[in-house]
Image (cartoon, rainbow, N blue to C red):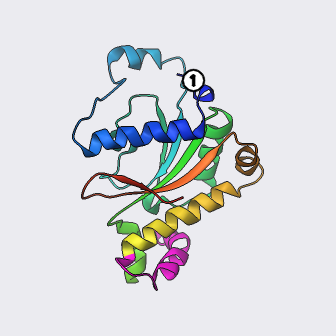
Amino acid sequence: MESTALGGDTVLERLLRGNRRFAAGCCRHPRQDTGRRNALVSGQAPWAAILSCADSRVPPELIFDQGLGDLFVVRVAGSIINDHLLGSLEYAAVGLRVPLLMVLAHSNCGAVAAVASGADLQGHMASLAPAIRPAVDRAGSMEGDLTDNAAREVARMTAGQLTASEPILAPLVRNGQLRITAAFYHLAHGTVELLS
């Protein structure tokens, strides 16, 4: 189905239905056969873009029970944003016309935990800390688990940055062509919680 035929709310509900199947252990594994693979050789028309943590326990196609070509997924430790990732998401919004962009954080995030604990991040891993630190600071006064609260804050902050991003994403959001939302995946029970 063409992504332009669907609105952001419809796409979000489709993702959440798939997640409910996944959490219940009733996955359909749709559109994963050789016919689907062959149909995608000449092009793609995903109906959602997801900026997700690179954590191996959080594969969006699986946790939303979707198939080949359904999701345009960008992954990076901590679900943060930089220019390269932003460019990829702009391509999804303009070139592929996805109506929904989700920022997906998760429980027990190693990148967020490292920053929250003050770990000495070596090499290029240290480049993750400046984007995560403000969320850790915000979460410091919240009740509950610091890492999970900070991961939720990272997702909210990243979604806010994307919503305000000029010159491409912000106008699409204002015109109702793109919905941007933040979400949080619970590793223990497999469910996705909407944050915005």
Instruction: Measuring from the top left, give residue 29's x and y in whole percent.
Output: 30, 29
Residue drawn at point x = 23 percent, y = 36 percent: 26
Q: Taking 129 as reference, is 94 left or right? A: right
Residue drawn at point x = 40 percent, y = 83 percent: 118
Classify residue 98 by image quadrant.
top right
Instruction: Measuring from the top left, give residue 193's x and y in whole percent.
Output: 41, 56
Classify residue 120 by image quadrant.
bottom left
Q: Taking 103 as reference, is 5 left or right? A: right
Q: Is residue 192 above or below residue 19?
A: below
Seen from the viewer's position, the closer of residues 118 and 79 is 79
Q: Quadrant of the C terminus?
A: bottom right
Q: Which residues are magenta?
A: 123-146
Q: Taking 56 as reference, is 125 left or right? A: right
Q: Residues within 10 Å of mark 1 (few under 14, many from 20)?
A: few
Q: Is residue 151 above or below residue 84?
A: below
The residue lying furthest to the bottom in this view is 141
Seen from the viewer's position, the closer of residues 82 and 124 is 82
Classify residue 185 by image quadrant.
bottom left
Is residue 126 rendered magenta in the image?
Answer: yes
Magenta stretch, overall SS: helix
* Residue, disc 1: 2
- Three-letter amino acid code at the position of disc 1: Glu
Instruction: Measuring from the top left, give residue 21's x and y in whole percent.
Output: 29, 39
Give the secondary structure at mark 1.
loop
Residue drawn at point x = 35 percent, y = 56 percent: 55
Instruction: Measuring from the top left, give residue 158's x and y in whole percent.
Output: 57, 61
The residue lying furthest to the left in this view is 25
Do we see residue 159 in this rendering? yes
